[in-house]
Image (cartoon, rainbow, N blue to C red):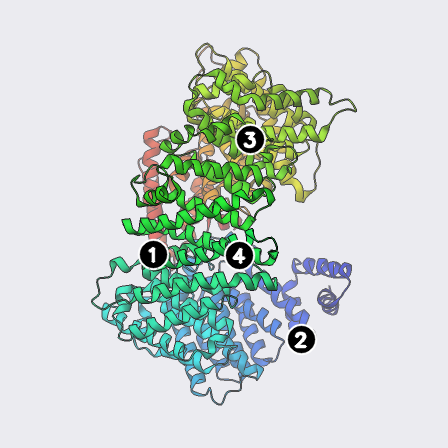
Amino acid sequence: MEVRQLELLCKQLYESSDSAQRAEAEKALVSFQNSPDTLSKCQLLLDRGDSCYAQLLAATTLTKLVSRSAQGLSLQQRVDIRNYVLNYLATRPKLPNFVIQALVALFARISKLGWFDNDKDEFVFRNVVTDITKFLQGSVEHCMIGVQLLSQLTCEMNQISEADANRSLTKHRKIASSFRDTQLFEIFRLSCTLLGTARENCKSLNFNDEGQHGLMTQLLRLAHNCLTFDFIGTSTDESSDDLCTVQIPTSWRPAFLDFTTLKLFFDLYHSLPNTLSPLALSCLVQIASVRRSLFSNTERAKFLTHLVNGVKHILQNPQGLSDPSNYHEFCRLLARLKSNYQLGELVMVENYPEAIQLIAKFTVQSLQMWQFAPNSVHYLLSLWQRMVASVPYVKATEPHLLETYTPEVSNAYITSRLESVAVVVREGLEDPLDDLGMVQQQLEQLSVIGRCEYQKTCTLLVQLFDQAARAYQELMASPNAQQIDVTIQEGRLTWLVYIIGSAIGGRVSFNSNDEHDAMDGELVCRVLQLMNLTDSRLAQGGCEKLELAMLSFFEQFRKIYVGDQVQKNSKVYRRLSEVLGLSDESMVLSVFIRKIITNLKYWGRSEPIISKTLQLLSDLSVGYSCVRKLVKLEEVQFMLNNHTSEHFPFLGNSVAVSEMRCRSMFYTSLGRLLMVDLGEDEDRFDNFMLPLTAAFESIGTMLASAETPLFAAEEAKKALIGLSRDLRGLAFAFNTKTSYMMLFDWIYPNYTPILLHAVELWYHDPQVTTPVLKLFAELVQNRSQRLQFDVSSPNGILLFREASKVICSYGSHILNVEVPKDQIYPMKLKGISICFSMLKAALCGSYVNFGVFRLYGDEALDNALNTFVKLLLSIPQSDLLDYPKLSQTYYVLLECLAQDHMSFLSTLEPRVFLYILSSISEGLTALGVNLNYFTDTMVCTGCCATLDHIVTYLFKQLTQKGKKTRRGVPTASDMFLQVLELHPEILQQILSTVLNVIMFEDCRNQWSMSRPLLGLILLNEEYFNQLRENIIRSQPPDKQAAMLQWFDNLMEGIERNLLTKNRDRFTQNLSMFRRDINDSLKGPNMTAASVSDMMTS
């Protein structure tokens, strides 16, 4: 491809408005990036320098080339590219920004990846600072490029790019640590020196000039990148602001002990314009968070004094804080004062009284300006929450003054939220109450803050609540009230109910006393009185937000004052008894249940209220003593006898299918309540099941006419979805043998055929199949050993047969359904995943003797297992790891099959066996798109166990090959062995993967990994010896003898068998082996040449 043509393609890609032309250009350029002569063409493009887009293409292509380790550029080529880039930037400082950025990124990537490369004992990529200092002595443009180079390099060292993720984390950490120890401090000092010079010349600098402004921005960013460097490799998530200790190395002490660095950034904040000052503040946030152990106690006290004085100075000259970015960073800085220093230390600072007064004033003002920067409030509240929480632990002689200022903060928060309501309603603004996540977070903080001087908090709340409730009552009574006024009062009451709930929830964190409980009683009475008022008016409609606040209040009240661990003589009950006549816990519980029934009756149309109400019912039905009191209430008996849609509209068929989800939770709670007194009373059970029996009968009648034109498909479908969800809820709750058997006898054999028929009819509609499959998956689950069938009972086998029918029916139908790629999970994989978990539960439930099936020629087991294989082969391998729920169900099922059904696995066709092995190989290094830490480890551990079973089986087969088989024992199929003779590379690949993870990766489950490794080594001894030679040869000469010794130690005393004793010894040897290697990796210049690199070399 000619250079001119490339320039034209770049122009088309970046400037053309025709999307087809852009796509064509992109296609052509991608093929250019993969062609063999890319390197020389890139240089030509840069040398010509005619088109900035072509320069961008050349820089990004070179970055890709450098990052791919496989094609491997030679050391000389990479050094040439690096020097070429530096010269190019030096001679053309006026390039467009995006080209400079791309070249700078190339320089950073090449320096990082070549960090340990040496030529004639010199590390060729490390003389960064000397090379870049030349830029810093040039023009403004040169200086800016120099700072950008340092900044990008610091970032690059800190980030795990895709290229690194595919290599090894240990290698990345090694490079980052070496950079930290050899260069980072020098770079940070350099940035401080340059910033210091800028501070001296601030008066003469012109910040409107793009060059000078740009240079300052880059300098501050550089300092910030140095301070946010991941010093100890914890790679915490950037977004979590609570883990805020900066692990500065001890060698940096001088920069923090003389307070010039601290002063520098405070000065910069005051002298820079608002476009730059937030960066200075974010550097201060990091400096304020330096680890405590960097200082001795006296040094820390001095440092804190300077810090507090700096904060005080900003508060005394607050003009800069009107800028939202400055304000936000300053709030973060305040929060760090407490997260990193103890209240006892803050109190001892000489200007503490003045500072705390200013901070309180600032907090109160901020809370009153509720529209300005709402996201920063969190930091201010966190400062006060942490200070109040540590009051009991302060041993200092100086007063902390919190009892003076904290009530002002609580007061400001409460009153400002109430005042916001009228403005929000009248001006149609966004309502903060719609963002419940943020409200809950603030209320959690307030629940602690409000408990300081709780008397004052309660008095204020009572006063405000009485005012609002009175106004609301008057509006309700007045015939010509304006709707807008009603909405405002409802909004105010909503805030008050939320705040009261959080105030009561704050009781946990302090040792409570009777007075506080009595005050809680006052608050609870008021909310319950309000509830009586609003409930009496529900027939005319209600306020959804207020109802949600009530439910949040009930949730807090339940946690603190209802349940097994509460003292019954609490003052709260005394107050409830005086005002509302609720003298004991049972009466309070009946208020809860009445509220729950009312909500379920009137709020069927509101999904959030129904699901929160059912969650409350579920929480109440879990407690041991609580549930026994509940059953005695007539309200609960009413629910157990009348769970139909006429009493509870959300159980009706008119509800949207998506909202039927919560029915399972309702029936789980009812099931728990029913079981308390159920015993073996079958009549009682049948009575309870009447509505469900009627529903099943009517669905059965409808489905019988499924082939006729009279079939009411929609109605039948909805009824079936609801019913499946109800039954799944019950099946979950019935975790004793007697209750489960009643359910089983009820559903089988009368109703299971109806469910099977439904799966055959609607197999393509996940709205139906998901609830039905989940119901079966619940029925075969041996929860709390409930599936203990009697010796003479065939129920276990009958239950498995039904499950097998459902799996086979769904499986055979779904295989023929074609769905678009973006719908594959909801339409297909989700159902398959539930089938996997159903099969796993049935196989592992240990209530069926699976040997019986073959003995009597029953095909239920083989059919289910063959369906599993067909389903598995229909799933592309990448999807197994990209959908976490699918990977969880697949890998646990596979482990179960390898453990108990190896005879089945060993008869599989070669392609199936190879598919399973490669899925294990993938799972060992599981890093699917959406997997999280927990799923990763789970999948990986499951794969190790499966692999261990397979390898052990193979080893046994091989060792027994020559021996005579005992008479009467059928010889197992040796299909496995034939496959492995044809494809030995598969187990070899797995062996190298496992060894690589154990030696060079962050191995989270070393024990699990060690179990299959011994078998893999014994099956591939020659290959293991080759691998070991390669690893030893790739080490520096002075390390080779040690590595050889470690490998010898690994196999010392290990015999050629897989007996437990031998395995345990190997596991012990392996942990020593891994420890030795890790220790030396921390030392200098050990090459973590990963095993996979050796495969390619």
Mark 1 vs mark 2, CA separation in Å: 68 Å
Mark 3 vs mark 4, CA separation in Å: 53 Å
Residue that mark 2 sits on: 49
Residue plotted at (34% across, 79% down): 260
In the image, 575 versus 765, the foreground residue is 575
Mark 4 vs mark 2, CA separation in Å: 68 Å
Q: Earlier in the sequence, mark 1 or mark 2?
A: 2
**Are the residues tagged 4 and 2 within 8 Å (C-beta)?**
no
The 10 Å Cα crowd at callout 1, few under 14, some 14 to 19, many 20 or more, is many
The 10 Å Cα crowd at callout 3, few under 14, some 14 to 19, many 20 or more, is many
Q: Where does the N terminus fall, quadrant-wise?
A: bottom right
In the image, 433 versus 318, the foreground residue is 433
Nearer the observer: mark 2 or 3; the answer is: 3
**Are the residues tagged 1 and 4 within 8 Å (C-beta)?**
no
The 10 Å Cα crowd at callout 2, few under 14, some 14 to 19, many 20 or more, is some
Residue 506: tell me if it is visible: yes
Asked where in the image residue 390 lies, by quadrant, the reply is bottom left
Q: Position of residue 854 (x, y in %)?
A: 54, 14
Mark 1 vs mark 4, CA separation in Å: 26 Å
Residue that mark 1 sits on: 451
Q: Residue furthest bottom?
A: 204
Which amino acid, mark 1? Arg
Q: Earlier in the sequence, mark 3 or mark 4?
A: 4
Which amino acid, mark 3? Phe
Q: Earlier in the sequence, mark 4 or mark 2?
A: 2
Q: Position of residue 248 (x, y in %)?
A: 35, 66
**Are the residues tagged 1 and 2 within 8 Å (C-beta)?**
no
Residue that mark 3 sits on: 836
As drawn, the label of residue 489 is: 4
